[in-house]
């Protein structure tokens, strides 16, 4: 399989350290959220995952929509990803995801089909399928 894109990010200091990409575009301090007993005030891995998943899923949705002949404006599609961190019965940390997808200008049946098609090609969806619970809600306007 041909790699279409690759990036490298270095992390040091765990949840209270930093991350930096080799190209310098990503350079962030990390902090444990206050709700987990940390000081807060900086981003955390769950926020980064939520942002990446939301952006990737929206792009996949726009791609399958174009292929199906739909043209959306910038404000016609929104994806909000909520990432939860929990403990399993075996006391391991696990993630959960809720995707809230809003699509303007199509009926419910079309929106459902587009979301299913986007889920099939989104790299984040494919990476976590079967390992992370993902709930999807779809709103049409």
Image: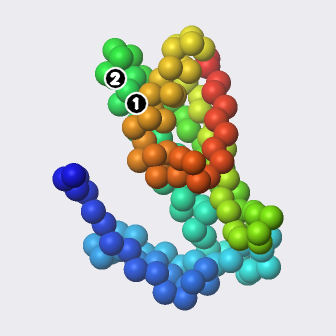
Q: Is residue 136 left or right of residue 1?
A: right
Camera-side residue of 47 and 93: 93
Q: Is residue 1 left or right of residue 31?
A: left
Where's residue 74, x and y in %? 44, 31
Q: CA distance from mark 1 to mark 2?
A: 6 Å
**Residue occupying image coordinates x 57% and y 12%:** 109
Q: Is residue 109 left or right of residue 89?
A: left
Where's residue 111, x and y in %? 54, 20
Q: Using the rendered image of the protein, determine whether residue 58 is visible from the camera's viewpoint.
A: no
The outermost residue toward the left is 2
Q: Is residue 134 left or right of residue 126?
A: right
Camera-side residue of 34 and 99: 99
- From the image, tell me which residue sits under label 2: 66
Does 21 sit above or below residue 57? below
Q: In the rendering, which numbered label is found on residue 46?
A: none
* CB contact under 8 Å: marks 1 and 2: yes
Camera-side residue of 61 and 39: 61
Where's residue 30, x and y in %? 58, 77
Q: Residues within 10 Å of mark 2 (few under 14, many from 20)?
A: few
Q: Using the rendered image of the protein, determine whether residue 116 is visible from the camera's viewpoint.
A: yes
**Residue occupying image coordinates x 56% and y 21%:** 112
Identify the secondary structure beneath mark 1. Answer: helix
The C terminus lies in which quarter of the figure? Answer: top right
Identify the secondary structure beneath mark 2. Answer: helix
- From the image, tell me which residue sits under label 1: 62
**Residue occupying image coordinates x 46% and y 81%:** 11
Quarter of the image for residue 139 reads top right
């Amino acid at each position: 399989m041909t790699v279409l894109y690759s990036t490298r990010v270095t992390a040091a200091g765990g949840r209270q350290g930093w991350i930096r990409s080799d190209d310098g575009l990503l350079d962030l301090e990390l902090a444990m959220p206050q709700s987990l007993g940390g000081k807060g005030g900086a981003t955390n891995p769950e926020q980064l995952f939520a942002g990446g998943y939301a952006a990737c899923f929206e792009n996949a949705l726009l791609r399958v929509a174009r292929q199906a002949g739909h043209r959306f404006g910038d404000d016609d599609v929104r994806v909000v990803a909520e990432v939860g961190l929990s403990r399993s019965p075996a006391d391991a940390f696990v993630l959960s995801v809720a995707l809230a997808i809003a699509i303007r200008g199509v009926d419910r049946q079309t929106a459902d089909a587009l979301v299913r098609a986007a889920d099939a090609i989104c790299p984040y969806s494919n990476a976590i399928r079967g390992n992370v619970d993902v709930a999807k809600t779809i709103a049409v306007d």
